[in-house]
Image (cartoon, helix red, strand yellow):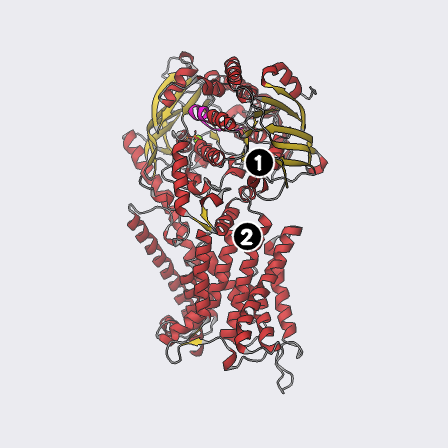
Amino acid sequence: MSDATSSTIATGKPSGFPVVPAVEMRGIIKRFGSTVACDRVDLVVQRGEIHGLLGQNGAGKSTLMKVLTGLLTPDAGVISIDGVPRIVKDPHAASKLGIAMVHQHFSVIEALTVWENVVLGEKGRLDEAATIKSVRAISERYGLDVDPTAKIATLTAGQRQRVEIIKCLRRDPSIVILDEPTSVLTLAESEELFSTLRYVVRDENRAVVLISHKLDEILNATDQVCIMRSGLVVAQLETAATDARSLAREMVGREVSLRGEAVALGLIQEAEEIAVEAADAVATPAGDVALRIDDVTVKGPGGVRLLDHLDLEIRQGEILGLAGVEGNGQVTLANVLSSLTDVDSGTVEVAGRAVRAGKAGAMARAGVAVIPEDRHAAGCVLDMSVAENLVLDDLDRVSNGRLVSSSKIRENAIRLIQQFDIMCPSPDTPMRFLSGGNQQRVVLARQISRNPKVLVAAQPTHGLDVGAVEYMTEQLRRVADEGVAVLLISTELEEILALSDRIAVINEGRIMGTLDRQEADLDRIGLMMGGQEL
Amino acid sequence: MTVPDQVTQSEEIMPMLMGPKVGKTRAGNIAINVGLYIVAFAAAFLLVSILILATTTTSPWDVMHALYTGSVSGWAAIGLTLEQATPILIVAIGVVIANRAGTFTIGPQGQFLMGGLVAGFVMFKFGLPVPVALPLCLVGGAIGGAIWAGIAALLRYTRGVDVIISTLLLNFVALELVDFCLNKIFLLQENVPTSPKPPQSAQLTTGERLPRIGHLPGFSVTSGVLIAIALTVAVAFVLARTKWGFRVRMLGLNPTAAQAAGVSMALFGGGALILSGAFAGLAGGVWFAGIGLRLTPGFEGGLGGEGLLVALIARRSVIATVPIAIFFGMLHSGGGYLATTGVPTNIVDIIRGLVVLAAIMPPVILHVWDNRRSLRVARRSAQRAVAGADLVEVAA
Ligand SMILES: Nc1ncnc2c1ncn2[C@@H]1O[C@H](COP(=O)(O)OP(=O)(O)OP(=O)(O)O)[C@@H](O)[C@H]1O
Ligand SMILES: [Mg+2]
């Protein structure tokens, strides 16, 4: 949608003629073995509108969109683009039709730079200068700040997500599909993106399908909402005529409780009230220190301090929220606590014992469980089964001596699948075949069920549907009440305010200060996030 | 709960029968798979026949008959086939371990040579009684191969040197080292009264060899076969059932998640590489003590490379290496017989190459078919739905 290349867009039909929808999917069926991911789905998207697609984890949203982009071939159904029935053979055919998609999981290549990733797959000669220029233009226009010459490997999850979006928009598609494009972006970023997208779509007569679990995003950004449940379309609503509560109800098929919903919605006042309630209800128990991070420094490439003399203490039974603008050392901290990164100086103590950082599995053995921000990188093994993924770092629990017991693995899997409501055909299903949100549930289930001393949750609600967010938050509260020290890392201030007993703020790898929940307010935290010491 | 066809996850099932879903039922699917393999092998056979007609004066039928006679026509031939398959199989299961851990090595050639060399020293230089020397020569062979792979592992995990490159170079070094040892009387060269002395070691006497099972002209095979069988079973079990196997698989599939879960890349990745070296070295020892009986320059004779190929075709399955290695053994025994009929034995190399291709192609073809089929279904369903109106396909 860069200005330079907007000549390809079809202009709207003169008024008075029947409007031909940009996308018309009729009776789409897609089965995977015995699973019916899409069951006679109809979806009509008009030009000039943003069409929300909502549904629980595993409802079939991503599958439907993969059918539209030719990544999957439907078992039945017709797709018409601008009124012409089409066979979308493969993604290449889709891109010829002007369809482009941002996928739920990142597909950027770590070893390449941002601009190289953006041109990847395009035909013709590479023009570095022109590409960089166009990346800058799109960044600026949509508020997607990223350095075109940076290596992907050095970027945070949020920055990678921006690259994915830029990559899609640069193709100048007239039909844009966004599958959870803002799962790791902050509310402010997503607001900016969608406010621009809205008028671009209207002015240039494009069509957008937006999949999101953030109800407020759906409410603010879309014109129409289609709600799916178990492969079926259960409702088709005009956004203006609905509200968060009814969306949630349609999606889940029951009322969703206040707290989970508030967090999911990012409704600040509501969330604050609840949190205060919660804080009042549970008088912070002063347990022993479970995790002590003492003067830890980690240097990155070029000597940059990713963590800079960082001190942090978390007591048993408390939830410490780590607030901060993304890219200020949160990932490095989580990596240190996952034994993925060594420290240059300083110590990490778990329950009073020093743990060697960087030694494979040392943190896990000491009782630290991490729910990583990027589940595909460190959280799971896609080509192992769900059952195996539920025991990755806790093999001893399902072994007899040196032998792994397949019956114990299975029992464990059946229990957790039920407890965490993981949707999968069987425990032996490869992790790869699960929907994004269900993969996240597997990671959560494994880490919570390990009985850790310290639970580190980085963006734990990433990709979860409203109901699962509710369950997730309940679980965090429960494990804390049972005496686990919880470190909640999130770029969503609302999530932190709603859940934490204490709040620490990180900036450029340093802790700017720690506040009790009662004394925390948005202004103060905001200032600290900007780099002001307490 | 019914399990959909796609989610058969056991890696030990012969992967070649588990291609993409093409048939309507599971049995149909397997039938189509098998059929495709038959077609692929028939095509390879045809190509080979044409080649034989074009380049030799023998008929393809005679060549095939000679291969058959030499490999499976009687108990003696079968014994020979199994014997030839033994070192290839031992190398191949080692390579499968390394591949499972995500390490790609091309070092078996050098490790095989080092294994044989160490075995040679143990047998000829230490003057030990045979009951001690024989087991020690096999253990020494394994250690020789392990050390050779260990160098590559060390370079990889301390200096970051690519394993493919280091193992390739180590292959050359091993070749030179063997040559050197076979050219020095004080090392391994046989002291014969002729001049110049040939660059080779002495030959193991009858009493010094690995015991044989059975007698010619009936079934007769080196007891090394038992070692290969025992190792295959053990490795399949260890990879599938033990914590170590679980961790090695995890490492191969996602090193980052493995590191977080306590699987150290250096320890497990390096360990798997060294183990694969030990297998190749052991194969060298078994070959020397049971089959070759004497060391000559380049005595490995391509066996290491064939082990790699077998592992390549078997993909990640230990069990699948067995039939494939036996097939390679057939080409050896049959090829040996063929040579006595005066046909150039390069033909056997060509057959091997074509057969490897024939074994690798079907999954690719099936994948393409699968895509075509689902597209056909989609097209038909869409056609029916739009009833007469034109479906438009985007030109590629
Ligand atoms: N390649 C596949 N093989 C087998 N089953 C699959 C495959 N892809 C998806 N599924 C199944 O299809 C169903 C729908 O998955 P899909 O990814 O469309 O869900 P989703 O609505 O995008 O959910 P989420 O919000 O969690 O991303 C799930 O039950 C999933 O397990
Ligand atoms: Mg999805």
The answer for how far apart the CA atoms under marks 2 and 1 are is 27 Å
Q: Quadrant of residue A424?
A: top left
B375 left or right, relative to B158 = left
Q: Which residue is mark 1?
A: A117
Residue nearest the observer in this picture, B334 or A10: B334
Residue shown at 46% from the left, 29% from the top: A98
Q: Provide residue B328's location: percent of width, then percent of height.
A: 44, 66
Relative to A69, is B372 above or below? Answer: below
Whether residue A463 is in magenta: the answer is: yes
Q: Which residues are magenta?
A: A459-471
Measuring from the top left, give residue B7's x and y in whole percent.
38, 43
Q: Is residue A491 above or below residue B58?
A: above
Residue highlighted by disc 2: B103
Is label 1 in a helix, a strand or a loop? helix
- Name the residue type under label 1: Asn
Assess disc 2: are there few (<14), some (14-19) or many (≥20) residues with their C-alpha within 10 Å of its C-alpha: many
For the C terminus of chain A, give its image quadrant: top right
Quarter of the rendering containing residue A304: top right
Q: Quadrant of residue B385?
A: top left
The kind of residue tagged 2 is Thr
Q: Is residue B388 visible?
A: no
